[in-house]
Every structure is written in C-alpha cells, then in structure tokens.
Image (spheres, rainbow, N blue to C red):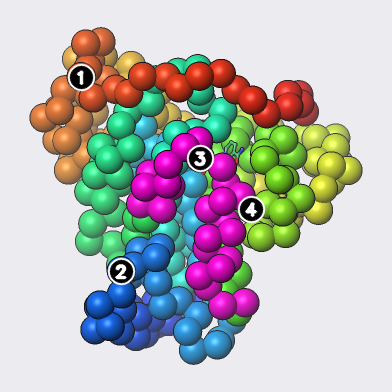
Amino acid sequence: MTGREQEGWGRRAELDAASTPAAAREGRPAVVCPRFDGVGADGAPVRLGIMGGTFDPIHQGHLACAEQAREAFGLAGVVFVPTGRPAFKRDRAVTDGAVRLEMCRAAVAGNPAFAVSPLEVDRPGITYAVDTLRALRHHYPANVELFFIAGADAILSIARWRESAEVARLARFAAATRPGFEVTESFKEELASRGAFRVDYFEVTALAISSSYLRERAARGLSLRYLTPDPVRKIIEARGLYRLEAPTTAAAVGGGKEAPWTP
Ligand code: NAP
C-alpha cells in the first residue's frame, strides 16, 4: 500500500468514527449517506469520489473502476449514486431505482471505502447531474473536493448536460474508458472550447464487462457468476430481473429534451 493510500485509509477511519455517530446522536437523517456525511468536518483538504451511473445492474467493472479511481486520485471514499430517471435514457426501460439501489448496496457491503446514496433515486423527476452536484456542494464544506466518476461515454456528452457551466464549476471529473475506447486529442480540444471542464481520463480493464452484457446473459438464462458480486447475482435471480418478461422493469419515460451535440 502506498503512503497516499495509507493516508486515505487512515483518514477514512477517522471520518467514519467522527461522522456517523454524530448524525445519529442528533437524530439527523443522512443527507448523502451515513458513512460519508461528515467528510471534511475537520477543515482539512479531502477528496471524495461520486460514482454516477445507471448501474443496471452494478458489476465487477464498476467496482474495479471505483477502486482504481480511489487510488489514482487519492479519494477518502467513493459514494455510488445510482441515477433516478437518467436524462439521456428516456427512450429505454430502466430497472426500478429502488431495486438498482438495493443491488448497489449489496455490492459494496463490507467495503469501508465505498457507500451508496439514494440522493438521485429519491429525487422526483428526471435526474440531472447539476442538481446532485449542487446538493453535494451545499452539504460539504469547501475543503471537500468532489470527483464525479462516470463512464467516458457519459462524460463525452458533458457539454450538453443541463447547466453545463455550473456542472464544470461544481466538480472535477474522472472519465473511465473501456479497453479499446480512445478519447482523441481533437475531442479534448473540442470539449475545452465548450467549457472549463476538468476531466481526467483513465482506462479500466475490468470495464470490458458491461451492464448490457449482463442483461443479455440474464435474458438468455446464462450464469452471472464472477461478473457481479454474489449478493447482486442472487438479487437478480430472486427477482427474475432482465428476463424478457421481467416484472420489475420500469416503463420508459418520454423523449430526450437536451440539445444534441455530436463530439
Ligand atoms: P451509464 O449508461 O450508466 O454509463 C455510460 C457508460 O459508461 C456505459 O457504457 C457504462 O457501462 C459505463 N459506466 C457507467 N457508470 C460508470 C462508472 N461510474 N464508471 C465507469 N463506467 C461507467 O450512464 P448514465 O447513467 O447515462 O450517466 C452516467 C452519469 O452521468 C450519471 O450520474 C448521470 O446522472 C450523469 N449524466 C448526467 C446528465 C445530465 O445531467 N444531463 C446526462 C447524462 C449523464 P455499463 O453499461 O456497464 O454501466
């Protein structure tokens, strides 16, 4: 373990000890999630990862991605925030938010560096990152630097997210690429010309696994063992998710509204 990692782990243990009992003692509900609500309370600079995605379902690639981002950016922890109603997926059905939340919680259970927040699933309406980042920025003191981690495919569209200038101001971004996914210099220049986005790109080999691959396998009755943690696999099996007749898949919710932009 490197010195930076040790620092992260030591700091996290302190934060766990300092934050959760205080919120519970005062009977305050968690704003982000009980484990990481008190991050930054001591005024020291600290970085927190916010892992955004649909997670339909969460898999080993997402977990490896969060772990690599934690190491690479010296994050005190990573909060998984499953989207409620994704802004750019209004033309396809997405599994009910409560079920995706349940799978995320099952996936990270036992890892003190990870937690899950219902922030987006609980918020009514279409999910916009700007609302999430505002809520987080409002909650955390200025010494907490937010790193929004997501798939590069999602980050590539950042310039057309709602209130993109505000999005750029509120957080730094870590864009995970799959093997073979290339972000060209001309794209980076194009993005820079569209706003002050601070984006770091990093390749995650384990992201060769994808949620769509898991959904396809589940639909064909094939095994998900080793592709997602066992507790998640068991939820998928018990609920019969992703079978063609799956009962827990929510209806698609209308057409996209944001201005199109092809990088
Ligand atoms: P997504 O479909 O979940 O992800 C896009 C791609 O990136 C997929 O190939 C996905 O693989 C991969 N991926 C997903 N989450 C990842 C993660 N955290 N790390 C690494 N790879 C990941 O994308 P989305 O749900 O549309 O958007 C991702 C995030 O961006 C969400 O938090 C969303 O709210 C935000 N976003 C905001 C706006 C807006 O505010 N207007 C618009 C678009 C996206 P898998 O299929 O294997 O997961």
Which label's residue is closer to the chain start, 1 or 4?
4
The residue shown at (73%, 27%) is 259
Does the magenta portion include 140? yes
- Earlier sequence position, callout 3 versus callout 2: 2
Amino acid type at circle 3 is: Thr
Q: Is 142 situated left or right of 108 in this image? A: right
Label 4 secondary element: strand
Q: Where is residue 41 shown, x and y percent of the image?
A: 47, 84
The majority secondary structure of the magenta stretch comes to helix
Question: Tag on residue 247?
Answer: 1
**Disc 2 on helix, strand or loop?**
loop
Residue for badge 2 = 29
Give how far apart the Cα atoms at labels 1 and 4 are.
35 Å
Q: Position of residue 109 (x, y in %)?
A: 23, 57
Give the Cα distance between marks 2 and 1: 32 Å
User: Toward the viewer: 125 or 102?
Assistant: 125
What amino acid type is highlighted by mark number 2? Answer: Pro
Please give the label number shown on residue 127.
3
Q: Residue at x 31, y 74 (%)?
A: 28
Q: Which amino acid lies under the numbered mark 4 shown in the image of this protein? A: Phe
Q: What kind of element bears circle 3? A: strand
Q: Is residue 262 magenta?
A: no
Lower position in the chain sequence, tag 4 or tag 3 = 3
Instruction: Please report contact status of discs 1 and 4: CB closer than 8 Å, yes or no.
Output: no
Horizontal arrangement in the rendering, residue 122 relative to residue 163 (left or right)? left
Which amino acid does the dot numbered 1 rest on?
A: Pro
**Res. 253 image quadrant:** top left
Residue indicated by mark 4: 173
